[in-house]
Amino acid sequence: MPDLVHLLPDHIANQIAAGEVIQRPASAVKELLENAVDAGATEINLLVNDAGKSLIQVTDNGRGMSETDARMAFERHATSKISHIDDLFRIKTMGFRGEALASIAAVAQVTIKTKRPEDESGTFIEIENSIVLKQEPVAAANGTCITMKNLFFNVPARRNFLKSNPSELRHIVEEFIRVAMAFPNIFFSLSSGGQQVFHLEKGSLKQRIVQILGNHYNARLVSVQEQTDYLNISGFVGKPETAKKTRGDQYFFVNNRFIKSAYLNHAVMNAFAELIPKDSFPLYVLFIDLDPAQIDINVHPTKQEIKFDDEKIAYAFVQSAVKHALAQFSITPTLDFDLDPQVQQLDSVTQPFTVEKQSQAAASSLYQTFTQKGQAHFIESKSELKHWKEYYEPKPANTSQQLTHNEAVLPAQVLTAQQIEKASILQVQLAYIVIQNDAGYLLLHQQNAHERVLYEKFAAAISGTAIATQRSLFPATIELGAADAVLLSELLPDLHCLGYELEPFGKNSFVIQGTPAGLEAGNDKLTIEKMLEQYKHFSNDLKFSKREKLLRSLSLQQSIKAGTALTVKEMQALLTDLFSCQLPNSTPNGKPTYMQFKKDELDKLFGR
């Protein structure tokens, strides 16, 4: 028998190792930007084409490299940043493993042009598949320019796993922001496909936050500053009114390195506990500076996970610092849920049906009985649930009108249009609709009911005839952050099917030329902004397709909110539309649209 164990060729070993570091174009962007920072650059320019798949170029004015250093930088584990094992516990640079350039060269076609200020000429090197094809002197500006073309050209299977261009560009923007946020004293620019996405002048941290996240945060940031013997905390948190349903605008940096830490995030959430609604997320950009010996950043190739020597101390200091900052600015809760019906329109009321809430609901006997029998809710005396009684005769389902996310179709109609027209209808608390029927009455939640109606309308439009567009007499302009602008660009074709006509208008801006016919005008910008927030919330759930997330987000945002007065005709129209739906009993997220109260049960409640 021949020997079975053998050494892999260098180029294959490099490709395998590259998979740990370079997972997508954004991974390469992160490594190249961090190297530019480590080189002492004061100006860093990032250029990408085809969402980084065909081109990523990072140019800096840092210290540059000698001819020998430039060649050595592409060898695996070649680094200028550590010499001894003890150096791992005193890391102050962004990169240190010596894997970044070697990994990039293993899966892309790379060129580097670099020059030190003291050298008369620079060095040009071309590498493909870890093999140096060319090395020669070249005229160059001080600093380094690394160009990476055709990522994964030699690993087609991995290239096939990359997402759409808008999706990959969003990841690039995220990595760019994380580096640019940490170094406001450095100029950064990002251009994609010939268009400039970011132009970030040097300035203070607050100026950098506003540059990236938007001018509307300028007066909504609270400074955090705490110094202790163990660590220093600085940065900003958003005032409570800036809290959103998604955790996008949250940044932790330890010694200027972006990290992900659910533990420290919990500390900030605790500091905001009584100031914002549950399931909302505050904005924060916080920097923790401490002795590098007190942390271990060498726990993951992406260097985004770290270990503290004493996590409990870090947790306590973060929570205390944020609480202290909020107290200094006299920020206290001011919401009163009992007085103003418009409060019902706040995010805290319309927040999404979270995974935790879904699991709690699914475990209840009410949910199980409802789903087993597939009928409307009704209430038994003393809240003891009994078997559901047959209320209507099922009709054959129309399979040509199946919903997009495979909901079970309930083919019955509780109330006909004629019954609705003749019945007495009443709106209660500007949130509920009561309608009498032969057996008793139905109690509907107007927003839930409208959400179901809109969802099925949008689902039909996506898969069939597009919704008509009503052109705006005075088109509104909406300005978004760079990441949201990329996301909206990705959604434009589907939004067009749903009646929205939006056109790009310069950098991160869109003109709303038209909205769905029949939609109340005036809140177009707010609807789209909230739709994007809701979409990002649904993005945490992998079982939803892109279209499904869009349908759910729009139906939730455009539905009639509690606190809206309805005329009898409007209520009749809503009821008719609801009971024409394939699944009238619940919203897409599983909330009931109506409950049934039967006369004999009402009699029992009053001893009759």
Image: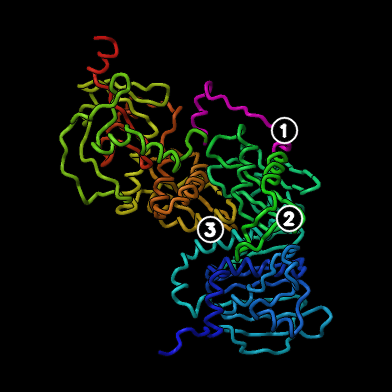
Q: Residue at x 30, y 23 (%)?
A: 384
Residue 532, x across and y down, in percent: 50, 48
> Residue 235 versus residue 547: which sits nearer the camera?
235
Residue 305 in the image: above or below residue 395: below
Element on which disc 3 rests:
helix
Which label lies toward us, 2 or 3? Answer: 2
> Residue 375 versus residue 550: which sits nearer the camera?
375
Q: Residue furthest right?
A: 118
Residue 589, x across and y down, in percent: 38, 41
Residue 587, x across and y down, in percent: 35, 39
Q: Residue furthest front?
A: 1
Closer to the N terminus: mark 1 or mark 3? Answer: 1
Magenta-colored span: 323-347
> In 3D space, how far apart are the residues under numbered discs 1 and 2 (Cα atoms)?
29 Å
**What is the three-letter code of the residue carrying label 3?**
Val
In what quadrant of the picture does the C terminus appear? top left
**What is the three-letter code of the residue carrying label 2?**
Gln
Seen in the image, is 3 located left or right of residue 596?
Answer: right
Circle 1 residue: 327
Element on which disc 1 rests:
helix
| Rendering quarter of residue 274 | top right
| Disc assigned to residue 486 | 3
Which label lies toward us, 1 or 2? Answer: 2
> In 3D space, how far apart are the residues under numbered discs 2 and 3 (Cα atoms)?
39 Å
Residue 242, x across and y down, in percent: 61, 40
Closer to the N terminus: mark 2 or mark 3? Answer: 2
Q: Residue at x 45, y 52 (%)?
A: 501
Closer to the N terminus: mark 1 or mark 2? Answer: 2
Q: Residue at x 75, y 62 (%)?
A: 186
Circle 2 residue: 294
**What is the three-letter code of the residue carrying label 1?**
Ala
